[in-house]
Image: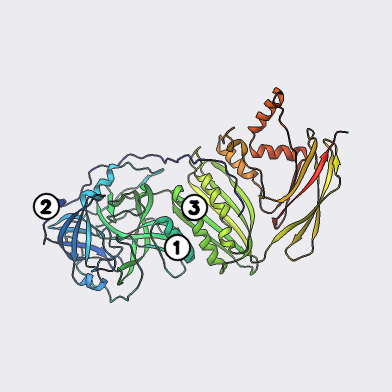
Amino acid sequence: MRKILILFLFLILYLATAGVAFAAKFSVPGGIMPVEALREGMKGTAFTVVKGDAVVSFPVTILSVLPSPDSPRNLILIRASGPVIEKTGGIAAGMSGSPVFIDGKLIGAIGYGWNFSEHETGLVTPIEEMAEIWKWPDRVPVIIPLDLNLTDPVSGDAGLPENDQPDVLPDSGDTIKKELSAPLLGMGYSARSAKRIGEILGSPVVMLPGDIRGVAVPVEYDPVLKPGEAVSVLVAWGDVSLAAIGTLTAVSSDGLFLAFAHPFTSRGAVAFPLARAWIHEVIPSIEAPFKIGTPGSIIGIVTQDRPQAIGGRIGQFAPVMDVSLKFADVDSGEKSFKRFKTAYDPFLMTKVIPEMLIGLVDNVWGRTGEGSAKITLKIEGGGLADGWQRTNLFFSSTDIGKDLFSEFSDLVDAISLNPFYEIMPLGIHLDVEITSDPRVVLIEDVNLSKKIVPPGGSFDVEITLRPFRKEPVIQKLTLRAPDDSEGLCEVVVRGGGIEEPGQESIEQGWRTIRSLQELLGEFSAMETNDEVVAEIRTFRLLVEDDPAAMEEEEESQRKLLSQIKEEKIKEGSMKSYRSNYYVDGLLRRMIRVVPE
C-alpha cells in the first residue's frame, strides 16, 4: 500500500453547531411511577410490536430493583408472561424501549436481558433516568422544524390493542449481547464489510438477504405515534441499508421522544434520522430471541445517544451525507450505479462509508481477489463551489476491492474533518473501473545520455518499462540540472508515490496548512500510482558562516510540497507522465554536474 501524504500531525477536533438543550423535564401524560414506589409482586403491562406495525401488550411482574454503580443507577427486574411472550420465546432484542405501565403510570422501558437464560426475565430502565438525557445540549448542524400532528400519548392500556397473536416462529442460532441491543440490520453489501462495520459500531450486523434496489425511505411530515411502536435509527439507507431496530417508549406533547432504554452507539449528542420500522418476525433462539425488521418512513431525529436511552424530536429532519458509486467491470462490460445516504456524523461515517463501499464492490463485481482498478473520487458540498476531484490507479495481488479504498479513506477523513470549516451538506462520489488483469508495469532499466553536464545543462533519460508478461517498451524524458547544482547528483526514476518526498516543512515545524484551499492543493499535488516520475536530486551543503545561504535555506524549509514540486517542474529537474498502468519499481543513476 502506498503511503498517503500526511498533512496534519494532530486532528483538530470538530465541533458541530451546538443547539439549545431541550427541556430538562420530560412530560408524560398520565404521569410516572418512580422507582421508590415499586414493590415486589406489582403487576404491570408492557407494549411492543412483534409483527408488522401492530402494538400488542403482555403482562409483567415486578421482582426487584437492582442498584448499579453505573448509569442507569437502578434497573427494575421483571418477569414477562402471557401468549405474546410464549410465542416469541421470551423478551427479544428489539423490544428494548418497550414501555411498562403500572396503574396507568409509566415506570420505564425494557432495556436489558441475559443470553442463554430464562428469557422471560429482563431489566427495565426507570423512566426518570431515561429522561435525564435532556440535561445535555444537542449539537445538530441543521434542524428543519415541521408542524407536529401527534395524538395524545397514551397511558396504561388506553388505545392499545391487546394480545395480538403472532404466528409460530422458526428457531435461529443468531446471537445478541447481554443488553437487549437494538438489532443492527444491514442489506446491500458483503458479509465481510458487515463484520467490520459491526466492529466499528460495537454491535454485530445481521445481514438480510435480498436486493433493496428501488426501495425508497420516504419522509413522513405529520407522524402520529404512540408508545410501543417499532422504530429504527438509520445509519444508511438507499442502495445499502443499515439500521438499528427498537421500540418507542414515550412521546411528550411538545414532540420529544424516548426510546431503546439503553444506548445505540453511546456517542452522546448525535444527529441520526429516526424512522418507523416494520417487524417481519421475532426469531426465537436458545441464546436470545431477536426481531427482524426493516425501516419505514423517516419521522424525526435522534439527538441524544446516552447510557440511559436514545431521544430526540419527532417531526424534525437530520442532515445527511450523500454517497454514490459508479462501477464498470472491464472484463464483462457490466456497469452499475449505486447511491445511498448516511447519517451526518463525519467522525463516525468516514470509518463506516469505506467499508460499505468495499462491500458494494464485492457484490457488484461478484468476486474478491487480485486485480487493477482506477478510481475517481469527487467531494462536493457547502463551501466547495466546484468540488474537489482526484483520480488514481491501484493494483493488488490479493484483494483489490479492499486496497482500492486505502487512499480514499484517508482523503475523505482529512477533508471532511478539516479544521477550517464544515462542509455541509457533504457529497462523496466515486467512479470505479476494475479488471482482474494485473495492469502493472515495471521500471526495468534506466540509461542516461550523458554522464557529465554543466549547471543548467540538459540530458535524456531513457526508461525501459515492462508491462506484466509483455515485451518491454522504452520512454524518454529530458531533465535539466538545476542552475545552482554542482558535483555528484542522483537521477531517480520511480513509480508515483514510491519514495515520494514528504511534507518536511510541516513535519519539521516550519509551517502548517492555513486554509482548506491549501489543504486541497497539497492533496492535488500528491503523486498517483500510474505516474512515471524522473527527477535529479542534488546534495547541498549548508555553509554555516554564510548568512545569505542560511536565510535561503530557512526560506526553502517553509515551502509546501506542492510549491517544491512546481518549482522543480518549472526548472526541468523533475518530469513525469501518467500511464494506464500501476507503475512499480525505483532505479537510481549518478550524474556529475561540472561548471564549464
Give whichever of discs 1 and 3 has the lower sequence position: 1
The local secondary structure at tag 2 comes to helix
Give whichever of discs 1 and 2 has the lower sequence position: 2
Give the percent coordinates (x, y) of residue 254: 26, 46
Question: Is 250 on the left-hand or right-hand side of 192?
Answer: left
- Residue type for callout 3: Asp
Locate residue 103: give its quadrant.
bottom left
Question: Is 376 on the left-hand or right-hand side of 354?
Answer: right
Residue drawn at x 64%, y 34% is 559
Q: Residues within 10 Å of mark 1 (few under 14, many from 20)?
A: some
Q: Which residue is mark 2?
A: 37
What is the CA distance from the residue labelled 1 to the residue labelled 3?
Answer: 23 Å
Locate residue 595: give its quadrant.
top right
Residue 333 can be seen, yes or no = yes
In the rendered view, would you say 570 is above or below 254? above
Q: Residues within 10 Å of mark 3 (few under 14, many from 20)?
A: some
- Which dot marks residue 322? 3
- Residue type for callout 2: Ala
* Residue in front for this viewpoint, 474 or 183: 474
